[in-house]
Amino acid sequence: MSEPNHARRFGLTWLVATVLAMPLVILLIGPIMPPGNGSEQASGQVTDNTVLLAMATPVLLLVVVYLLYAIIFFRQPQGAALEGPAVRGNARIQTTWIVVTSLLVLSLAGYGTARLLANYGAGTGSGPTPLTVPSGRKLPVQVIAQQWAFTYRYPTYGGVETPHLVLPANQMVELHVTSLDVIHSFWAYQLGVKADANPNVDNVAFVKPTRVQTFEVRCSELCGIWHGEMFDHGRVVTPSAFNAWIREQQVKFAATTKVLPPYSRTYLPEPTRRGG
Ligand SMILES: [Cu+2]
């Protein structure tokens, strides 16, 4: 019995599996990809995660289909222990391998870089001088991390500082993330925002929440014994509800606002010195 053309048969099996699996991955898994559609930036990350998964699918199938193919067709005959032929070098396979993997990695690097810039630093924080800044009106909100709580300062509303984060829907927000002591990380999961909070650094990230919702805020950098305590729920509300809320905060924290240092992009690291 002559050997079948394994390369062609395996190649065809892999191709069929890929053609069947890729649309399923994009259509079924894509919509449930994290972090959801709570903001324009979060939706962008869902797209990116779907693209990466779709690109990884043929690679995964190559391994899985080859494994199954080998188990089925390259079995040792019962009772025998045969050595395969010694194969050294195959210019065509080697060239194909290097070209395909290089193209895949380089195109993903290009895509990743472009998408990172288009995401306005939401998933990373852009540092004090962002390379890309969205156009139009932006609401600046400062996120101040310290052991072990986040507070939020609204410089355009008299520098009032609040213990909870409330944002208006469909408004581009300019987050300025900083810390008063150790390294923390501000993570608003459903909004697709994660930015390091470093002392003496103004880490800028932009986000535009798309609907009224509740989102989770966590610290994503182990920052001491009560790290897990840095958890809260933030809210995205209608613009009019936001205006009412911020006015309420201004009244409620009027005494505190008076003794706070003036709004600044960073503060002295020690909380006591900041408090005067
Ligand atoms: Cu922390």
Image (tube, rainbow, N blue to C red):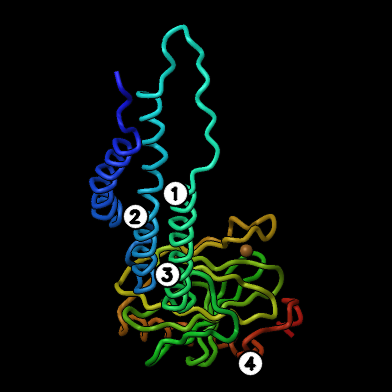
For disc 4, the marked residue is 262
For marks 1 and 3, give the one nearer the viewer: 1
Q: Is residue 164 above or below residue 155?
A: above
Contact between marks 4 and 2 (CB within 8 A): the answer is no
Mark 1, Cα crowd under 10 Å, few <14 / some 14-19 / many 20+, is: few
Mark 4, Cα crowd under 10 Å, few <14 / some 14-19 / many 20+, is: few
Secondary element under disc 4, as helix, strand or loop, is loop
Mark 3, Cα crowd under 10 Å, few <14 / some 14-19 / many 20+, is: some
For disc 1, the marked residue is 92
* Foreground residue among 3 and 135: 3
Ligand 1 located in image quadrant: bottom right
Q: Earlier in the sequence, mark 4 or mark 1?
A: 1
Mark 4 and mark 3: span between their CA atoms? Answer: 41 Å
For marks 4 and 1, give the one nearer the viewer: 1
Give residue 54's mark.
2
Q: Amino acid at mark 1?
A: Arg
Q: Amino acid at mark 2?
A: Ala
Q: Residue at x 29, y 46 (%)?
A: 18
The quadrant in which residue 212 appears is bottom left
Does mark 2's beta carbon lie closer than 8 Å to ligand 1? no
Q: Residue at x 62, y 61 (%)?
A: 221
Does mark 3's beta carbon lie closer than 8 Å to ligand 1? no
For marks 1 and 2, give the one nearer the viewer: 1
Question: How many numbered markers are drawn?
Answer: 4
For disc 3, the marked residue is 111
The quadrant in which residue 60 appears is top left
Mark 1 and mark 2: span between their CA atoms? Answer: 26 Å
